[in-house]
Structure formats: C-alpha cells, structure tokens
Amino acid sequence: MAKKNAAGGTPATVALTRAGIRFTVRTYDHDPSATSYGLEAADALGLDPARVLKTLCVSVDGALVIGIVPVAGQLDLKAIAAAVGGKRATMADPGQAERATGYVVGGISPVGQKRSHPTVLDESATAYDTVFVSGGKRGMDLELAPADLIAATGARTAPIAR
C-alpha cells in the first residue's frame, strides 16, 4: 500500500499521513440513489462485504461513541454499550453525527474526525490483513491494516456486530 500525500486530501487521509500510517485510496462513482453506502462501496470496488466497514455514531448514556462494523451486518447496540461500560445505546441523530465528526452521513470516516470519540471496532475486522473504511467522502474508501486503524482511532475491539 502506498502512503498518500496529505495535500488536497480529506481529514482522514491527512491524519493517516501525519501519523505515518500506510493506506491506499480506492474511489468509485457514488450513486446518489444508493440505499446502503457501505454495500455500494463493496459492490463498486468488487470487495468482500466482510472487509468493508461502516462507521456508525451512537449515543451511549448520552455520550457519542463510534462503532465500526462490517457493512453486511448490523451494529448490536447492547454490545457497543457494554464495550464502553455503558448501559443504553441509541443511534445518534444524523445531524449530530455530522456535526461531531465533520463528515457527511455516508462518508463518515473513523479517522480524522473533528473531535475524538471512544471508538469500538468489531473484532471480526482483525481476521483480515487489510480492511476498508470511508475516506471522508462518499465514493472514497481507504484500505489499511486493522492494527493501523486501531492505532489511528484509539479503538478497542469487541464483538459489536450481529
């Protein structure tokens, strides 16, 4: 994987470059009528949906938490709450997610967010040499090693997908 130049990149690519983390940018033509951004990315890039991850914002006991799970699955709200020591989780309002991360829904990257949030990566991601996450805009994914994703986000791993 090539290390990308920060010039002209998204906050995610800039953050990864500054951290010295190797990644590859993969782009595709985003279809505005797509109903699942993650599955659209997997299909457009010809990837196994288990390796393509979606970034979801949830409120756990009133605090924003980031969950990263395979696009083919769903986030288990009870599991993510437990993973961060909380009791109750609900999906965050899309507007709240956009304001807190600095990204638009469908392009929320777990890397380079406006503010740091507790982050939990589904443990299934660690079974792969590389995984794909949003690069910070629709139609752009980043391929990187799960260990590097963990390092870049400060994530912990837990079984949070179903």
Image (spheres, helix red, strand yellow):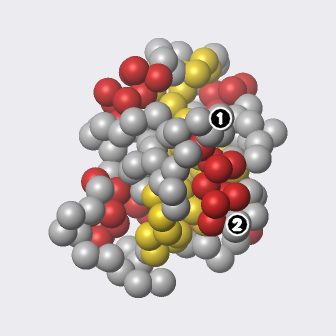
What is the quadrant of residue 152 in the picture?
bottom left
Q: Is residue 68 above or below residue 78?
A: below
Question: Pointer 2: what residue?
Answer: 47
Residue 35 circle label: 1
Name the element at disc 2. Answer: loop
Numbered tag placed on residue 24 in the rendering? none
Q: Is residue 153 left or right of residue 75?
A: left
What distance separates the C-alpha of mark 1 from that of mark 2? Answer: 18 Å
Dividing the picture into quadrants, the one containing residue 45 is bottom right
> Is any atom of residue 133 visible in this view?
yes
Residue drawn at x 36%, y 80% is 3
Q: Badge 2 local density, few (<14 within 10 Å), some, or many (20+)?
A: some
Tell me which amino acid carries mark 1. Thr
Residue 89 percent across, percent down from the top left: 61, 20
Residue at (65, 76) in percent of width and height: 129
Q: Position of residue 70 (x, y in %)?
A: 69, 50
